[in-house]
Image (cartoon, grey):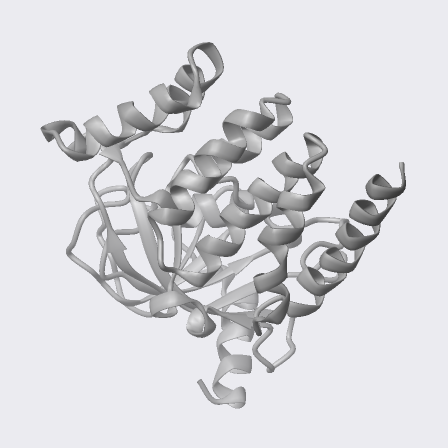
């Protein structure tokens, strides 16, 4: 979008109170009209989609370009992500409240411009490089995929891993993958990273290590490999397995993505391994 056009749209959204109308859940959509919700969220339909309505438990994949306040430069875009989309589970993935509210009104194929006041974004906190009190403008925000609502496996796998063991959790996951139950659950490994976080928080480090190793074998995506490697690293360090942690990190320290972080971690682990050998 050209800078001048973006500024016009921002001005329209901020000042068009006279044209605002309350959101209608019957989707009586009028293109190019501004909708304002009671929370202060504003959005304008550029294109109406007729696909799956986003529900709690829907997996959503969306393309967007994010602008901050009246700055005409793109602050962040999903163009650099896999398939140029940001994926999440609506109502389950932790997101800013304005973003969650926006998606509750949308369906697959919808394309909107949305403006989130700071009260629906990061408020008086600096986060992800966004300045305090910033208004977020998603221009455009396009829902490219929305699934039917499904249940998450995370809680079930956590309960099995914590009360039985990691092998039992993996066996259960494999059973789901190879049965009709896979249509009831979100089974993509990218939806299970938070499971490892929660296992580490509960000091179930061996279980987190085992499941991270398993998930690493189930994905070829670089971002997910890094996520699972990170959680495995946390588990290994927490168990004092510095040699294994160093072997995990070494190949990651030579890659392009997040290379500096992994390189610094490698140096830190080399020091820990050296100290262990002295002691």
Task: Tell me if I can see residue 8 in this picture.
Answer: yes
Q: Is residue 93 above or below residue 85?
A: above
Which residue is the extreme one toward the top?
163
Q: Give x and y (percent) for residue 49.
A: 20, 60
Which quarter of the figure is the N terminus placed in?
bottom left
Q: Is residue 239 left or right of residue 274?
A: left
Task: Give the camera-side residue of 133 and 128.
Answer: 128
- Please tell me which residue is depicted at 26% across the width and 62% down the height of the picture: 30
Which residue is the extreme one toward the front?
278
Q: Give x and y (percent) for residue 229.
A: 54, 49
Q: Is residue 260 left or right of residue 183?
A: right
Task: Give the camera-side residue of 182 and 173.
Answer: 173
How many numbered marks, from 0 up? Answer: 0
- Please tell me which residue is depicted at 83% across the width and 49% down the height of the picture: 274
Q: Is residue 259 above or below residue 266?
A: below
- Please tell me which residue is depicted at 76% across the width and 57% down the height of the picture: 132
- Please tell me which residue is depicted at 10% across the width and 29% down the height of the picture: 180
Q: Is residue 180 left or right of residue 145?
A: left
Q: Quadrant of residue 67?
A: bottom right
Task: Give the camera-side residue of 186 and 226.
Answer: 226
Which quarter of the figure is the C terminus placed in?
top right
Q: Quadrant of residue 243?
A: top right
Task: Tell me if I can see residue 22 in this picture.
Answer: no
Q: Give x and y (percent) for residue 249.
A: 62, 56
Q: Quadrant of residue 45?
A: bottom left
Task: Give the camera-side residue of 127 and 21.
Answer: 127
Q: Give x and y (percent) for residue 39.
A: 53, 43
């Amino acid at each position: 979008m050209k800078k001048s056009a973006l500024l016009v749209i921002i001005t329209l959204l901020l000042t068009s109170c006279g044209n605002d109308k309350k959101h209608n859940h019957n989707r009586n959509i009028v293109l190019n009209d501004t909708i304002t919700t009671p929370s202060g969220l504003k959005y304008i339909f550029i294109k109406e989609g007729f696909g799956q309505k986003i529900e709690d438990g829907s997996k959503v994949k969306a393309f967007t370009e994010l602008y901050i306040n009246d700055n005409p430069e793109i602050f962040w875009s999903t163009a650099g992500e896999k398939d140029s989309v940001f994926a999440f589970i609506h109502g389950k993935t932790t997101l800013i409240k304005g973003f969650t509210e926006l998606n509750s009104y949308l369906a697959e194929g919808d394309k909107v411009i949305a403006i989130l006041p700071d009260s629906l974004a990061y408020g008086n906190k600096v986060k992800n490089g966004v300045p305090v009190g910033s208004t977020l403008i998603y221009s455009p925000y396009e829902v490219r995929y929305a699934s039917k609502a499904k249940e998450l496996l995370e809680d079930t796998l956590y309960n099995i891993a914590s009360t039985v063991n990691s092998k039992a959790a993996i066996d259960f996951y494999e059973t789901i993958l190879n049965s009709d139950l896979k249509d009831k659950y979100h089974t993509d490994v990218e939806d299970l990273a938070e499971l490892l976080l929660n296992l580490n928080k509960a000091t179930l480090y061996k279980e987190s290590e085992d499941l991270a190793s398993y998930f690493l074998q189930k994905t070829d995506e670089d971002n997910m490999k890094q996520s699972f490697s990170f959680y495995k690293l946390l588990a290994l360090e927490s168990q004092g397995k510095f040699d294994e942690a160093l072997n995990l990190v070494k190949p990651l320290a030579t890659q392009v993505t997040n290379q500096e972080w992994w390189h610094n971690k490698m140096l830190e682990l080399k020091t820990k391994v050296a100290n262990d050998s002295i002691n």
